[in-house]
Image: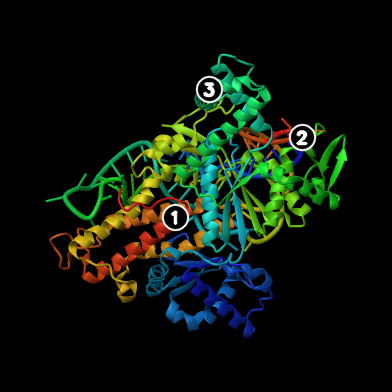
Amino acid sequence: MSVTQGVIQEKVESALRQALADAKAKGLLKIETCPGITLDAPKRPEWGDLANTVAMVLATSEKMAPQDIAEIIVKNLLPAHDQLFERVNIVKPGFINFTVRPSVWLEVLREIERQESAYGTTDVGIGKRVLVEYVSANPTGPLHVGHGRGAAVGQALAKLLKAVGHDVVNEYYINDAGRQMKLLGASVYARYRELVGQPIAFPEDGYHGSYIRAVAERIHAAEGDRLATLPPDQAEQRCRELAYHELLGLIRNDLHAFGMEFDSWFSEASLISSGAVEKAFADLKSRDLLFEEDGALWFRSSKFGDEKDRVVRKQDGECTYLASDIAYHRDKLQRGYDLLIDVWGADHHGYIPRMQAVMQAYGHPKDRLQVVLVQLVKLLRGGAEVKMSKRTGEFVTMREVIEEVGADAAKFYFLMRDSKTQLDFDLELAKQHSSDNPVYYVQYAHARICSLWRVAAARGIVCPSALETDLTVLTDPDELGLIRKLSAYPEVLQASAVAFEPHRVTYYLQQLAALMHTFYNKHRIMPPAGDQESGESPSTEALSPKITAARLVLMRAVQQVLRNGLSVLGISAPEQM
RNA sequence: GCGCCCGUAGCUCAGUCGGAUAGAGCAUCAGCCUUCUAAGCUGAGGGUCGCUGGUUCGAUUCCAGCCGGGCGCACCA
């Protein structure tokens, strides 16, 4: 199956399919199973624009030499040849290389102009509803850098899936129940007691971060010594509630500052109070997937490939975290989503089989749930590692990173690498305003084009519509290279979406920006000031009004694609830098 | 011990449903601003794609076994 989406690729692919069908009709080829047709840009530009390997793929089943098969295919391609291709040649092992007529490539520019912000999007996911759940940090402290990466990846994934036609909901799961919340209350209460001069033992496994003291101080400022007179249980619960609201508010603010907009905030506690957990249990029981043993309640997850069964209610009667997770994911299923995506820290990967078992337990295929893992971020400053320890609460927060390097730079860095590999994030580099910093490199390419419009406006030059512009003057390899890159964008977007790998878009944008900077540096677009008539550029290149018009159209297309790509990553495209 | 992920240039990493001479950025070295933003561009050097076998016309890509690194194997979350 091909994922080809670009205008040109589609034309070439259908021409190829037609040739294969014709060859089959004439009895020249058997073609029992229709081979997948992929068109890739060859490694070297002199080999043409698009390369194809069908001939080699067919070699075995046809019992023919790849080159002979290629010969047949090319012969049957002839009718389409004239309009589409400048050259079609067969090379060594059996590649068929297509060189598309430059005039055909130019259609991409018209396509981009026509589609604007929709260029690159597709509707292959039409009608499919997807829930993307990410961040979902415990409201027991501020978000740290790792959450930042999860946030960037989750958001980009959601936007990416939307771009290929899915109906997407962004959700944050709030772990506002259970042991962690108890510990939060106990920790804050202990700090509060210190403030009122009645210290008690700090809870074992409590939260040591300095923000706990800050929360206690604010509670003391608001409530005075009053809580000390309450029974410890009540006081602790009060501390828990106040701390929870404060910390969740903090998290919301941080996410807002990072440009995150969640459609839905789902409370774990609500699952318990609504009886959803009990209903989920009853449902499992009716399917004989829940049993009691050693005084505990177990989920028979081993039936679905998990390595062992899992406890959902402990001997002491407390439910485990898994219990709410089962109810939560059951709820997601009941809300009717076709695909559930969970973005998790990579250290939770061992949890995947049991959650996929939940899918199967409720009668869905296990891949209804896809887990995207996000590896650790190693924070550096000028090459030296910034040490963090979650245990002592000494970690760099997401907010600190955003404040230091900016939301755009932080997102770009988080999205530069495959999320499942560890990431080195150098704070000094991320805030540097130079070409060494990939974020500025890409944004600057966009800003530079915007600057062209300002200059053009000042000189009374108007960028015409692609439809009424003679684009055939765009014949320079740098121009055609840019156009080819632009035409690849839809494919990149789609491949990135189906693989759940936003970093492919980031990579693409860097390449596109590099081509743009090269072009900009080497060629003039408008005549130099004071020489409004056709003149000579420093590279002794003739610059007629026709060329200016065509290049302006090209630049506008590049700008559009840069903007579209940055937008899908949740990063701004500044007009000026 | 078992499971998952990773191992590609000095460094950080792309690429891989099997294809042509393995790519980019940083770093190093050598160059380029009276111009529409030098927040930029050009060029050079740099590789047994962890190792060993297997499948194949063809393997960095697939399979097996090793080696090295990370993570996970709770009636924690």
Which residue appears at 40% of the width and 73% of the height?
A: A107
Tell me if residue A551 can be seen. yes
Q: For the residue labelled by badge 2, is the local secondary structure a helix, a strand or a loop?
A: loop
Instruction: Give whichever of A520, A552 is nearer the camera.
Output: A552
Look at mark 2 in the image and give the residue it sits on. A318
Q: Do the residues marked 1 and 2 share a common chain?
A: yes
Location of the N terminus of chain A (image quadrant): bottom right
Name the kind of residue labelled 2 in the image. Glu
Q: CA distance from mark 1 to mark 2?
A: 45 Å
Q: Are marks 3 and 2 in contact (CB under 8 Å)?
A: no
For discs 3 and 2, the disc positioned in front in the rendered view:
3
Look at mark 1 in the image and give the residue it sits on. A567
Residue A6 % position (x, y): 48, 68
Q: Label 2 lies in what chain?
A: A
Name the kind of residue labelled 1 in the image. Ser
Q: Do the residues marked 3 and 1 share a common chain?
A: yes
Q: Are marks 1 and 2 in contact (CB under 8 Å)?
A: no
Give the total of numbered labels.
Answer: 3
Residue A348 % position (x, y): 66, 40
Look at mark 3 in the image and give the residue it sits on. A224
